[in-house]
Amino acid sequence: MNAKSVVRSYWDGRSQTYSIDIYKSRSEAEHLWKTLLKNTIRTNRNLRILDVGTGTGFLALLLAEMGHNVTGIDISRRMLEKSRQNADAMRLSIEFMHGDAEKLPFEDGTFDIVVNRNILWTLPDPLAAACEWSRVVKSGGKLVLIDGTWNDSATKMHLRRLLGRLVAFVTERQNPMAFTSYYSKIKDQLPFFSGSNPDDVANLFSEVGLTNVSVNRLERLREFENKNRSISYNIANNPSLFMALGEKW
């Protein structure tokens, strides 16, 4: 079974209930995320930035609001429809493209920064993807990856995810069995299906030749998410969030 086709189909369907407004306090969330991104980018120049696995455009929209020239790419065409609608509503100019995170349609050294958020667990070949992300970054540019542990196999977390999906069905009209029906077929083909940790990503970055690799444990963001995400999310998730940064020379 082709894992990418299954991932694409799942997120096409998930787009119907997936919202940009994932936090109770959107303004506070935007301030926190923009501060985090600004401290990571560390320049006042307007940069060319690629958001891989952009989904509804969460990072792309923030970065565009900060004045950067942003491109978002995603494997799900329907999620891209949502991202375009969100950008139009916010009067932001962002180029959104359909494409594969493991085979990017860009020339070498196209972007100053490549970012992605919560995408590793969906990829059949994370090393190939990291190679591509590094390839399209300019010399002196940065690769920024935000991730965590999402599908912990412990019995306690398995039960919490089941309960969280039932709550999501009642409060958010999400099909509680959709995730399992899609991903149970392909999870063995996804090396980071259960999530990643900082050591995993640091090793990945080193394998593709990135230097000055560093990790931010994002404790403040995790605390904020615990207080400001939906009830269903908090029941189903207890991720150890982190941000990994690598530089290309």
Image (spheres, rainbow, N blue to C red):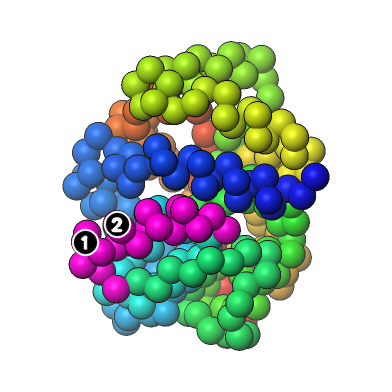
* Image quadrant assignment for residue 159: top right
**C-beta proximity under 8 Å, tags 1 and 2:** yes
Residue at left offset 29%, top offset 77%:
44
What is the C-alpha distance between the residues marked 1 and 2? 6 Å
Left or right: residue 112 compared with residue 82: right
Amino acid on which the number 1 mark rests in the picture: Met
Instruction: Identify the residue under disc 1.
Output: 90
- In the rendered view, tell whether residue 203 sits above or below residue 94: above
Q: Which mark is drawn over residue 86?
A: 2
Query: Residue 108: image x %, image y %?
Result: 62, 85
Residue at left offset 48%, top offset 40%:
14
Residue at left offset 49%, top offset 26%:
175
Q: Is residue 19 magenta?
A: no
Front one among 166 and 240: 166
Left or right: residue 225 compared with residue 135: left
Secondary structure under tag 2 reads helix
What span is in magenta? 75-93
